Image: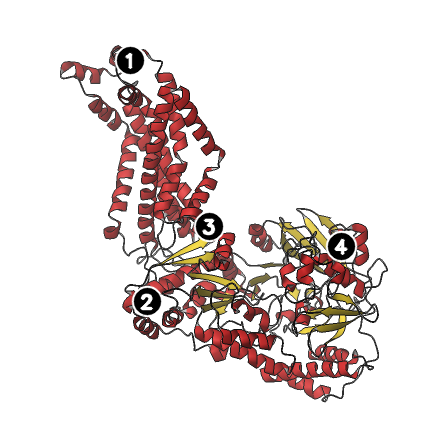
Amino acid sequence: MTSSGITVTPDVELAGLAGRPLSNRRRAQRRFFRQRLAVVGLVITGGLLLLALLAPFVAPTSYDVSNLAVANRFPERAYPFGTDAIGADYLSRIIYGLRTSLIVAFTAVAIACLIGIPLGLVAGLRGGAADFVVLRLVEVMTAFPGILFAIFIVSITGGGVRNVILVIGITSWVTLCRLTRAQLLTLREQEYVLAARALGAPDSRIAVRHLLPNALAPLIVAVTLAIPTAIFTEAGLSFLGIGINEPTPSLGKMVADSAPYIRVYWHLGLFPTAAIALTMLGFTFLGDGLRDALDPRQN
Amino acid sequence: MSTSDEMRRLRELAAADDPHDPRLGAKRLARLEGRLRRRSLLGGALGVAGWAALGGPAVTRLAAAPARQDADALPADAAPAAEQVFVLPSDATVDKTPDFYESVYERVSEASSDVFSDPLVRLNRNFEIVPAAALEWAGSDDGKTWTFQLDPALMWNDGTPVTAADWVATFRYGADPAHAWDFTWFFQGVLKGWDEAIAGEIPLEELGVRQGANPNELIFEAVVAAPYLPAMLLYSTPLSAKALTEAGPLYNSNPATSVSAGPFRLVEWTNDQRVVYEKNPDYTGQLKVPVNRVVIKLAAKNTYFTMYQNDEIDYMQYPAPAELQIAQAEFPEQIYSAVGDFRTFYLFFDVTTAPFDDIRVRQAFAHAVDRDTIKTQILGPAGVPAFSWLAPGFPAANGEALSSIQGYDPALAKQLLAEAGFPEGEGFPAQELWLRNESPLNQNVANAIAANLRQLLGIEIEVSNKDQKLFMDSLTAKPTKIPFGIVSYGMDFLDPFNMLSVWLGGGRHSWANPDFDAKVKEAASFTGEPAERTTMFQDAERILVEDVPAVFVYHETPVQLIKPWVKGAFLEPDENGIRALHWPGYTAGSTVTQELYIGSDAPSGRGDS
């Protein structure tokens, strides 16, 4: 690995050779910041996160303030993004909508990771009975269309942000689980795993220290793509009337709600769509950059 | 319809009275007088003129039978007969049958069905019940037995006469448990034997619909005094007993087996594409229909507006909000507000639990809803503010007298809420406002109301648009699972009893008021003076409005787009000021069919492809 690295990126390796060997983290950081798109992704994502976090200070009004007398205004000085059908400032709705969507997406994906990755690790590493049980569980989940399962759960628990997060979390762990398991199936046959075993390392250590870092690249991509997917799932649930309720805005719901108006009130569709697109673009760039940076096979 | 036409019709009604049955004739006249008086009260010049022309009870009798359908009566600005083509859209996913008694909710075309036979009665453009297949009718003194004298001239175009046997067969088919008709509830608790028959407990032969003294006399028996039964029988387009036996209930979905005694006959039925009717040359009923051909284009609902813009259809209903905006900008003169089924949208409360068990809370909500701004900013031509239950134009409607009870008064609303123990909304539990799978328009209305209540009264309200089944199951659960919601109700038949019965105790809402129940039930079966009956219903409605189990928000006036070349008296203001294709649409159940014609300015070749 090191020898091939010298031919491809001599400066890095030379620097490494000249002084203290670079830590994995430093190397990853360098690789990351050398990619322009990854930096753009980081800036976009960071900007959106900041906007969402500071919504109460940034937004012109609160999300639940409206004035019917100024309904359906096109963008103008007082309302840079226009107003919606009941006269709420659309810019404020979008900032708060971004906040809702990001909260839902991050938390839901975190839940999915917490369920999916450990299950995948156990199945992939242990095999046998554990693998059998996990795979059957995965098949049960796959047999249900995700949205149907989500509807089922929400109709029992009721809507609202918290339940939507839980529902998206427990319906979207399957991909992560299968991916982790598939990665482990190839990785566990590698010599270094054999070496670790020979040295008496317990399964948990092998999984976390040796296998997971090597399986990380595709997982990171999957997680980054799971975030926009979660935003869309939330939009779908809200669209079906079992998701997030008015007056809490969410980007997906704003797009869905704008559909009947889009031929006239273009701003109602354009701005939330652009916000979703920007979010998605940011996360995709960031994910790609992270994959390239973190992949220990790239050096 | 012109005044002279109206007069002719009234005379025909009188002329049709059986001279051998003075009791029947007297009743008929009393009803006529009642109608004319009501009209005079409404201030209609027609009413006064009509009464004068009739000269009191001395009625001129016309010897001749009603004039039959002929083609040479087209107005001067009408297109030639070959171009009298009316083109309508219809939902391509709903094209099972054109017949009410086969399926109400899977009938082709929401705008034009039930044209292959005449119902017993039909509506004119003022929503009055006028004779159709039945030339006259009378109820027994207890109001439980209703006898209809059928027009002996009516013929199916297979040469069979239309007789009571056709209605008997049709109603038995409707009650047949094997058929599982989707509208059986309509006659429940009204027709004798109906409930038992649909449950399969008695043979269909025991149903209270039978032939009278001769094949042209049809008798309905009710389990209660039902002065509203003739109004209900707007929905009585019969199936042909013969075709029903020989070709099965879907005989009208295929031109080869279709049989018509109505103004049109079926000439084409192409699933997913189109259904075509042509004027029935053998029709012997009373409708004189100018249109020669009705083309129903089967398409996806969201394509109607584009079709309309491209002149592919002449008419459509319910444009989406943005489509309406386009129409308002480009062809405002083609926008009409109908009354549809006199639908009223309202907020409702579970009055049995806190905080809505306190009338002051309900009153505060009622005074906090700014209906006028909702009308101007959201509804536009699609609705009018409502402050009471019965929509303008509906029998016994009393909107003006009741309008102040729930009127918009922000200061009073805040004061009432404070008196109820929630000053500025402090301590008021957060609410979820349930919606029944509403359209974008109604979601906007609901969101605006929620914003109204939030900003004015300081009450946290989430708006949640629910699945229809979930909503209805939760609403009708005992006890109800919806503390606070918005929903609508549209009439099934033109009688105050129908609309008011929604609020009877034990119905779909938890509000129960014995005083209201007693008044409505008493008025429902009251067979005396119609004006007195109206007053009884109005008293009941006042209780409903004053006790605020509901905050009335708006009466729907469905938006129709009608091409300028579609002409006729139905587009002139009726007694209620309505200019539109009236309920129940272009069917044998409405006299609008004989008013509507295609002008000479229509592009030719419409409906060909």
Q: Earlier in the sequence, mark 1 or mark 3?
A: 1
Task: Bin the neighbour count of mark 2 within 10 Å (Cα to Cα): few under 14, some 14-19, many 20 and up.
Answer: some
Task: Bin the neighbour count of mark 1 within 10 Å (Cα to Cα): few under 14, some 14-19, many 20 and up.
Answer: some
Q: Are marks 1 and 4 on the same chain?
A: no
Residue tagged by mark 1? A197
Q: Are marks 1 and 3 on the same chain?
A: yes
Q: Chain of mark 4?
A: B
Q: CA distance from mark 2 to mark 3?
A: 30 Å
Q: Residue at x 56, y 69 (%)?
A: B501
Q: Amino acid at mark 2?
A: Leu
* Mark 2 residue element: helix
Q: CA distance from mark 1 to mark 3?
A: 58 Å
User: Which x, y percent locates residue B107?
Assistant: 66, 55
Q: CA distance from mark 4 to mark 2?
A: 57 Å
Q: CA distance from mark 1 to mark 2?
A: 70 Å
Q: Amino acid at mark 3?
A: Ala
Asked if residue B199 is positioned above or below residue B37 in the image, the reply reads above
Q: Chain of mark 1?
A: A
Residue tagged by mark 3? A259
Q: Residue at x 32, y 55 (%)?
A: A63
User: Which x, y percent locates residue A147?
Assistant: 46, 40
The answer to whether A275 appears left or right of B244 in the picture is left
- State which mark lies toward you, 3 or 4: 4
User: Given the current orientation, which residue lies at the most extreme right position?
Assistant: B159
- State which mark lies toward you, 1 or 2: 1
- State which mark lies toward you, 2 or 3: 2
Q: Are marks 3 and 4 in contact (CB under 8 Å)?
A: no
Residue B266 seen in the current view = yes
Q: What's the mark number on residue B266? A: 4
The answer to whether A166 appears left or right of B248 in the picture is left
